[in-house]
Amino acid sequence: MDQELGSGHEHTSRAWAPPVDAVSGENVLDDAVRVGQESLGGRLLAGYALGSLAHGGFSPSVSDVDLALVLADPLQSSDPESLRGVAEKVRSMGSSLHSRVSIFWGTPASLSGRSAGGRFPPLDRLCLLEHGRLLTGDDARHGLPRPDRGDLLVTGARFALDALAEDVVAKADRPDLLVAAGVRWTTKIVLFPVRFLFTAETGREGTNDAAAGHYLAQAQAQAQAQAQAPGAELVAAALGWRANSPSRDDAMAMLGDGLVPLYVHYLTDHIRRLEACGNSELARAFREWRSRLLLA
């Protein structure tokens, strides 16, 4: 899920529907594993596909390529630089998909909380445990604890503030600017809050398909009860946009109708949850975000 903004995951493309690379996601994973093996040698215990290349729903035009590497303990001071080098080498291989590689890494001790270090946020550890697909080595997940649900909530909220808030507020009344950023970023803007809502409610990973399906099922139940389902039509559309891009005009119309109601619903839900878990600072930041959005 982690977006590594500024390192191959920018949302500045002006192509609404960019061309699809000749290489596949599996090709990129193979390259990344090979570079990891060359760099880390015998310290590499296991490598896993994460994200949509693990649980399904991969779209060459919009998906990231997520790889997890588990190293032998103990962590070494040179590990961060070594892993940065692996990621940079893969991203330099030329294709758009190669440029979208994210590498998450740690050791059994860091993944179990017995030591600090590595790069493996709670939401991505949850993906490793629930959906990680072993690519090389021996499965190293046995006995690893699930992330705490409070940590999942807080991590998702901080990510939303850092990566989504400014764009959502700035472009809420200018869907043409969202569309100008391309279908890849636009689908993320729509589906991230739905994924966070799913994880907050269930404690499970909010994959695009599972989270959108859950949200739309709730929307159908609300419709039968004559209640409002904020942004449900937009959520259904954005899930489809991952595979088949609509016209710019259709996308702008749906974003104009559905984006603000969807985010107001998400923010209101998470203000309540953050207050309940005692994180008044994040709850206040979400209230401010909601106020700015309603004034946009």
Image: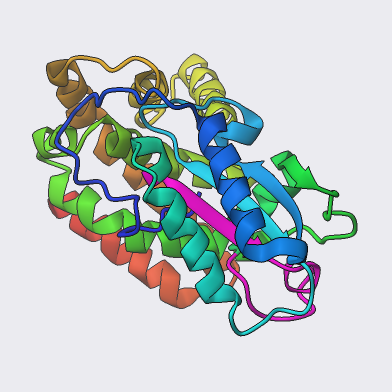
Give whichever of 156, 133 is nearer the camera: 133
Magenta includes 102? yes
Chosen colour scheme: rainbow
Residue 203 visible to an observer of this rendering: no
| Residue lying farthest to the bottom in this orientation | 77
Q: Residue at x 24, y 15 (%)?
A: 246
Number of numbered markers: 0
For residue 87: magenta?
no
Q: Quadrant of residue 31?
A: top right
At a point 51% along the width and 31% down the height, the residue shown is: 25
For the record, the magenta segment spans: 99-119
Estimate the x, y position of residue 66 in percent, counting from the top left: 54, 45
Q: Name the residue at 19% across, 46% down.
A: 12
86 to 99, vertically: above or below: below
Residue 258 appears in which quarter of the rendering? Answer: top left
Horizontal relation, residue 69 to residue 209: left or right:
right
User: In the figure, residue 109 lies in which quadrant?
Assistant: bottom right
2, 76: nearer the viewer: 76
38 or 205, nearer to the observer: 38
Compared with residue 124, is residue 186 higher up or lower down, i.e. above or below?
above
Image coordinates for residue 82, horizontal then vertical, percent: 55, 70
Q: Is residue 226 left or right of residue 135?
A: left
Residue depicted at x 51% and y 14%: 224
Asked whether residue 104 appears in the rendered view, the answer is yes
- Residue 9 x %, y %: 34, 50
Residue 122 on image: x %, y %: 62, 61
